Image: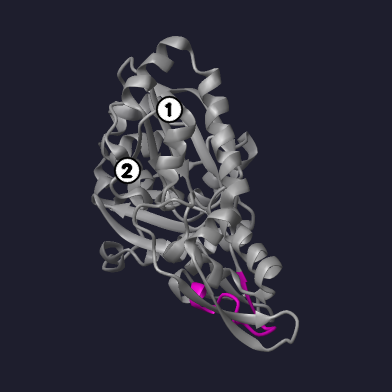
Amino acid sequence: MGFFDFLTEDIAIDLGTANTLIVHNGKVVVDSPSIVARNRATGKIIAVGKEAAMMQGKTHENIKTIRPLKDGVIADFDASEKMISMFIKEIPALKKKLFPPSLRMVICIPSGITEVEMRAVKDSAERVNGKEVYLIHEPMAAAIGIGVDIMQPKGNMIVDIGGGTTEIAVIALGGIVCDKSVKIAGDVFTNDIVYYMRTQHNLYVGERTAEKIKIQIGAATEDLEVPPEEMSVQGRDLLTGKPKEVKIGYREIAKALDKSILRVEDAVMETLSQTPPELAADIYNTGIYLAGGGSMLRGLDKRLSQKTDLPVYIAEDPLRAVVRGTGLTLKNLDKYKSVLANKY
């Protein structure tokens, strides 16, 4: 421990395609959509997070809303850096400081990420005052966040359905034994709903409305025990051009999402087929853990359970499982040193 350690702050970041969460002192201090609004004329960032999300789909030609992360990796380098920097400035404890402190960070990344993409995340973090930057794979962070003891010689299967990617991994002895990362997740589900509304109802809805439909009445199967009520959806009629409203039920959404969920199921089955037999025996006993926002889709756990013949459990706060795990890793860096993706 050096003399200047009191000038260093520890933060854990879950840099997600849909939401960015930051943990500081064991608490989630930032939980905002990963969206940036930029003025096209000046190139200046005018809003980030919730404020920018409210502008989405409602901007005029001088303002553009950008999602700097696509499929879990940085797509717009400049915007993502500004976004991370503005989120860090929002941390209440750091606002009071006279000087911006140096930061020790743990950031989680998708398991299918390339070396180049890893480097991009690390460079972004260093530019916003990151003194020590550690990276951890998302399924690993999710497992730690769920409360799985990852260091044991015992197999655990984690399925983390985020906004941009679905990460499936079998973890044992503090490492990923086999994994699969598919680009079918929350965003694809939202696009499926937009497409379904256009083709079946001639109704053109925006991304935000589709997201709302997914959350309110989204389902993975048509036979739910507690079905949600029908929902009124407003949009533009593609035939007349007039605004109109239609009522839709969860069964329609289950139909709309069916193909994408099938692909997630296939990826889970493929990962299971690559699992070594001893670990497969463990998974038979422990089941599959679901994390990430996509796991909150009604009936998804039931559907996966029927497909795999295994028990499926949803993490208690699936949206925050990954960032919780990232925070715990930061707290016990020495214990989890071997788990980190790249020891720079």
Amino acid type for the residue under numbered disc 2: Ala
The disc, 1 or 2, on the residue closer to the chain's N-terminal end is 1
Q: Is residue 59 left or right of residue 141?
A: right
- Is 64 covered by the magenta stretch? yes
Please give the count of numbered marks on the rendered protein: 2
> What colouring style does the render use?
one colour
Magenta residues, start to end: 52-65
From the image, state whether disc 1 or disc 2 is nearer to you.
Answer: 1
Q: Residue at x 33, y 29 (%)?
A: 336
Q: Which residue is mark 2?
A: 315
Tell me the quarter of the picture where residue 339 sits: top left
> Along the line of sight, which residue is nearer the eye, 176 or 132?
176
Q: For label 2, count other residues whose C-alpha is less than 10 Å away and answer few (under 14), some (14-19) or many (20+).
A: many
Q: Residue at x 43, y 17 (%)?
A: 280
Queried whether the magenta region covers residue 286, the answer comes back as no
Q: Is residue 335 visible from the viewing direction of this image?
A: yes
Query: Badge 1 is on which residue?
Result: 309
Tag 1: Cα neighbours inside 10 Å, few (<14), some, or many (≥20)?
few
Asked if residue 204 is positioned above or below residue 166 in the image, the reply reads: below
